[in-house]
Amino acid sequence: MTPLPVITGFGGISPAGRSSAHRGYSRLVESALAETERLALIASLKGLSGTTTPDEHLLSNTLVRSLESSLFDPQAQRVHRETVLSQANGPDLAVLVPETLAAKVTSAGQLPSAFDPAALYASRNHPRALQMTVYGASDAINSLGIDWRAIRATVAPDAISVYAGNCMGQLDQGGFGGMLQARLLGRKITSKQLPLGLTEMPADFINAYLLGNLGTTGTSAAACATFLYNLRQGILDIRSGSARVAIVGTSEAPLVPEVFEGFNVMGALGADAKLRALDGLAADAEFDSRRACRPFGDNCGFTLAESSQFVVLMDDSLAMELGANILGSVSDVFINADGFKKSIASPGVGNYLTMAKAVASARAIVGERSLGTRCLVQAHGTGTPQNRVSESAILDRIAAEFGIDNWQVSAVKAFVGHSLASSGGDQLMATLGLWQHGIIPGIETVTALADDVCKQHLDFVLRHRHVGTEGIDVALLNSKGFGGNNATATVLAPHITRRLLAARHGAKAMDYHQQRNESAQEAAADYDRAASTGDHRILYHFDNNVMDEAALSFSYAQDHSPLAVSVGRDRPSVPLNLSSPYAGLLGEA
């Protein structure tokens, strides 16, 4: 049987807070939570901030909000940039600078106030996205409730894949941003800025400093669809049998002045003046930054955000053997380009194909009735006029083609903003939370759908909706990226995944798994409690058990059996068979 990629752990950090134990999800639906869950959410936020401030203050310092000065001062940056560019480029450009910077953007999806990932380990001037990687990947691995050494002792050293990265690279002072600014500002380029700026560096950090991993590694670079592209890499490795564990994620930290300015001159961001105009406010009036991102409503642009999200996948046999948590499964991720395009930033036809394939996959697994009434679409939902028209048209057309009358649609960017490469991870975390708490996060920044939104076959969830923990069987995560990067994932609910596992492994195996799973659940809950007190158990092992050639042993039998490499030290002596599926086709070599 083809292995099923099971979601056994997840974690991260986003404007909603810590992802593990569904704490970040809880922030999205805070107003609909039971009191015990609300108190647990507040505790998790206190664990991040290290403060005992009032509950409402903690809550107000999360999600999309007015841009804080902890990363940079927006007003001071405007004055500085205007002065530098005027002096460097002469009077002609000086005339253009005020116009370029006039459309201020002061709303963003920022990590919770007072949370500093650099303070939790020896960060050594790492760029912010890599600091967030260390935290987010640690959170995901700790959420497993299974000691990582036990996992590594069970599988071959090359049977663990890591796919993690971002689409912008590291653009703050520790990475490419500092390298490119150094000469202009009269500074020296450091030896770390170039290598630490590379887009695949989150995967490299996880392998080298968190896990000591020897397996497959890398990242896709697919603009705002990067998380789902990496997710596809992970599930393909597990389905093919080349990996038994896959850690998949992204870490994006784009809240730097140049990125704001770059997207803003494209007209892509929800600038202050445009948001005031939407609400009919005077030019100098205060506006509600909380409502800056309005997917499928009357809107004016997306809201930039930072986020680091990771998920741990296992093949179903390993998950059953270890008693791992069964949080859902990913049956497919489909990817299609747009073909010829008028503009790199314009929509195309590729997303019609990915959605149609994902729906067909879901129907083949859960059936037509479930698809029509118990399926949720997590829309890309950026909050731009172009997206509300193009994506709603795609969803409405696909729903009609498959006979779906009221397809439920949600969009979490309304709460956390657009974290670019990590946006698909934000969608997945919200979906996993739905299956734990039974509430679909509503698009609550929108009071009414825009007139040009296609909605004949769609049911946009504008208010938090209680559907029960088993009210949704399958979720479709949709991502669209500049350049024609389209991806849609078919994600199966925990109760559907358990039914699949029972059909594949039998009742006796399910009983065995349940017994073993009790300790994993207890350990995961213990980690959640520790993190809520500020003990985040960061996994960071610099210069730890560094391997050399003495740790390897090679063997090659005279009967021409495959070459095997055994890895020693703290790893099991499991041979890595090096052969080819095409061996023997040419006869005796």
Image (tube, rainbow, N blue to C red):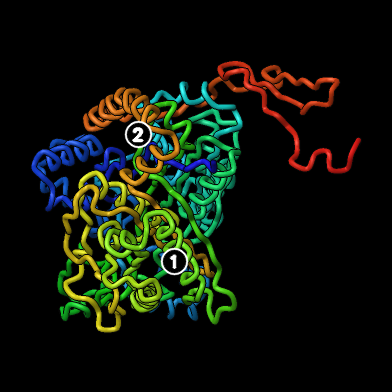
Q: Is residue 558 above or below residue 499?
A: above
Which residue position holds label 1?
A: 355
What residue is at 40 percent from the left and 43 percent from the top? 500
**Where on the picture, by quarter, is residue 519?**
top left
In the displayed structure, does residue 21 sit left or right of residue 348? left
Disc 1 residue type (three-letter) = Met
Q: Do callouts 1 and 2 mark residues in contact (Cβ within 8 Å)?
A: no
What residue is at 52 percent from the left and 56 percent from the top? 181
Total labels drawn: 2
Which residue position holds label 2?
A: 325
Percent coordinates x, y for residue 282 in the rendering: 16, 79
Q: Is residue 549 visible?
A: yes
Q: Name the foreground residue: 111 vs 28.
A: 28
Dot 1 or dot 2: first in sequence order is: 2
Q: Name the foreground residue: 55 vs 323.
A: 323
Disc 2 residue type (three-letter) = Asn
Q: Residues within 10 Å of mark 1 (few under 14, many from 20)?
A: many
**Where on the picture, by quarter, is residue 548?**
top right
